[in-house]
Image (cartoon, rainbow, N blue to C red):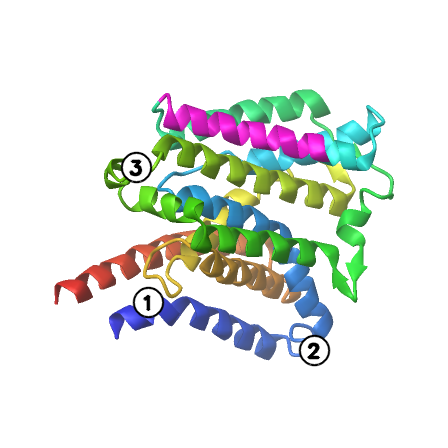
Amino acid sequence: MLVLSGRYGTPAVLVLLLIGFTAASPQAFMTGQNLLNILNQSATLAIVAGGLTLPLVAGKFDLSFAAVVSLSGILAVGFLERSGLPWFAAVLLALAAASIIGLVNGLLVAYLRINPIVATLGTSTMLLGVNYAYSNGTPITLAPGPFTDIARASVLGIPAPIILTAIVLGGLWVALNFTLLGHHMQAVGTNQVAARMAGVRVARITVIAFAICALCAGLAGVVLAARIGSGQVTAGDGYLLNAFAAVFLGASVLRDGDFHILGTVVGVLIVTVTFNGLSLLGAQSYVQFLFQGGILVAATALSSTSRGMLLASVRH
């Protein structure tokens, strides 16, 4: 029973949040338009958190993805405005830059054996400098056009970011659960020594995990820049804590503390629903910050508790 409560506690929290905000704001919260807004607001966070899930599955932390979100948006808009590149070329170059950063992170961790927290924190700090240098510390704005349509277009009434997010998360889910790469990634995260003895190329798996994480962060940064019509140094700041909170919340869904994509989706919805509901209720910004930190602490505790309950149930 303890294990079951851990497995289904997080989805129950989401249901309670939906009920609570509906009762508190019945005319505004549970409407078709607001529910669509929640999904649209979830899009970039879901892409970031989905990418972050992979290195965590492989047992590694990445603290640089928020800076990658900012960098990719700045580069995409900068290439369009300053270099006059076509929008698709600007996007591809921004995503390529993000992927290279992920590869560098992976090489630092896998081959130079630098602690992943230290390595990615260092990378994040350097990227902050690059972001400021390229943008001069001010937003690079962009007039509406094909690039901004990435975030503003819709198909059958469904915003394009939601469709893109579904495709990305679906691909990550398939990769983690039904491919050799995903199985090797889980093996590395479970026991790196045993995985290496079984023939898994641990270093390569680590590099791939970091590269995909950065690529997803880059994609989210491009979508965010298209949505707000500018590239900004601070664009990715809010994603660091929220993405970790979402992934750790999701780790307790069905898997007893293991990171997985479906759980991450539930975690993202909890985070987004919370902020959307608080905003509709007119909560001050400091209240949202309190919830932001509280969600991360609660998510980590819930994930750890789920693992502990599973071990206890196995022993008995």
Q: Nearer the viewer, mark 1 or mark 2?
A: 1
Disc 2 from disc 3: Cα separation: 58 Å
Q: Which amino acid does label 3 sit on?
A: Gly
The structure residue drawn at horizontal position 34% and vertical position 59%, both measured from the top left corner, is 302
Label 1 vs 2, first from the N-terminus: 1
Residue tagged by mark 1? 6
**Residue 205 x %, y %:** 41, 36
Which of the pair 249/160 is nearer the observer?
160
The structure residue drawn at horizontal position 69% and vertical position 78%, both measured from the top left corner, is 27
Q: Which amino acid does label 2 sit on?
A: Gln
Which of the pair 277/38 is nearer the observer?
38
**Residue 132 x %, y %:** 65, 24
Q: Is residue 26 above or below residue 196?
A: below
Which of the pair 241/44 is nearer the observer?
44
Which of the pair 188/275 is nearer the observer?
188
Residue tagged by mark 3? 199
Q: Taking the image as drawn, is residue 121 in sight?
A: no
Looking at the rendered image, the quarter that the N terminus falls into is bottom left
Tell me the element at label 2: loop
Q: Taking the image as drawn, is residue 111 in sight?
A: yes
Residue tagged by mark 2? 27
Disc 1 from disc 2: Cα separation: 33 Å
Q: In this view, does 57 lie above or below 208?
A: below
